[in-house]
Image: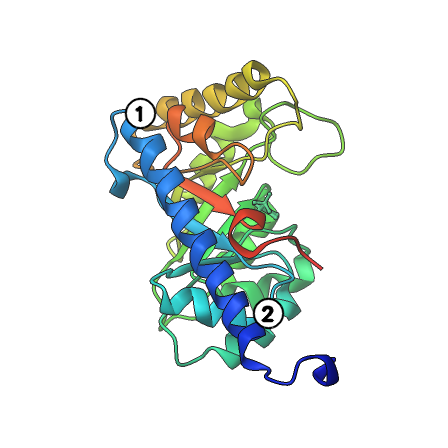
Amino acid sequence: MRLSRNHNAMPIKTATMNNLTNRYKNVRSRVNSACLKASRTPESVTLLAVSKRHSAEKIRQLYDLGQKCFGENQVQEALHKRQYLQDLDIQWHFIGTIQSNKTRDISEHFDWVQSVDRLKILQRLAEQRPRQLQPLNICLQVNIDSEPQKSGVLPEDLPELAARAVELKALTLRGLMAIPRQSQNLDTLRGSFSRLYQQYQSLNEQGFALDTLSMGMSADLEIAVDQGSTMVRIGTDLFGPRD
Ligand SMILES: *Cc1c(COP(=O)(O)O)cnc(C)c1O
């Protein structure tokens, strides 16, 4: 902090808060307009604030503005923040790559896990979920463009994994999540979102009671909402660039 150049420290803090307030209002209004355009109600899309690599203090500020759901992708980082924010009624979502040796921490400290892509992880999360807690909400991450090296269950393996997930009583299968291939071409991106929506619909026709389709990030939330997203995961456009 260069206090010598800033004799009154308050304006900096106020400026940060105003930025966050403005960004939050802006993202909310983008989601609302996207819903309006798609003839959907604003309540049909949940805003998940992706707070990875942003401070607990910023999470608290956003919470005070009305934001309740936050997403993190590193277990240790998330646990530190949780500790500091214990007094808040936050719904915590895990959205990162899951290593087997982290499933206990994830299952004990999160409300949702959106990045499950294999049976072993499902089983561990179920076994390790504390009895006194509600079932852990699960989204299966789908590698919707079948990209090599990318996490996510392949589309052709999804029905089998979903069938196994609903057998586990400590879990509630809520839906699907995907991060489509990076593409400058909006039609390509729309195609990926549309295929994920079809997978979601198809599972529901088979009797799975899914209510969550987690797709869309800062750059493409409008297209995702147009294609049926029920949850957009926004980091950069809410918090600014990550460190
Ligand atoms: C980081 C991240 C986001 C948010 O990305 P932004 O482009 O910053 O909005 C969304 N989903 C997942 C899985 C992420 O890891």
**Residue 96 visible in the displayed image:** yes
Q: Position of residue 154 (x, y in %)?
A: 60, 27
Quadrant for residue 13, please give it: bottom right
Assign a secondary structure to mark 2.
loop
Q: Is residue 193 above or below residue 188?
A: below
Q: Is residue 98 left or right of residue 139?
A: right
Image x and y of residue 127, in percent: 50, 61
The mark nearer the N terminus, 2 or 1, is 1
Q: Tell me whether the residue at label 2 lies in contact with that at label 1, contact meaning CB atoms closer than 8 angstroms.
A: no
Instruction: Return the residue nearer the eye: 64 or 90.
Output: 64
Distance from label 2 to label 1 (Cα)?
34 Å
Left or right: residue 32 compared with residue 105: left
Q: Position of residue 7 (x, y in %)?
A: 64, 85
Kind of residue at badge 1: Lys
Determine which of the numbered discs, if any, sits on residue 137 in the image.
none
Regarding mark 1 in the picture, which secondary structure is present there? helix
Q: Tell me which amino acid carries mark 2.
A: Ser
Residue at (74%, 85%) from the top-left corner?
4
Q: Nearer the viewer, residue 162 or 92?
A: 92
Q: Which residue is drawn at the image coordinates 38% and 75% (left, top)?
A: 88
Give the labeled residue for mark 2. Answer: 55
Residue at left 23%, top 35%? 41
Name the side, left or right, on which 77 lies relative to 125: right
Residue linked to disc 1: 37
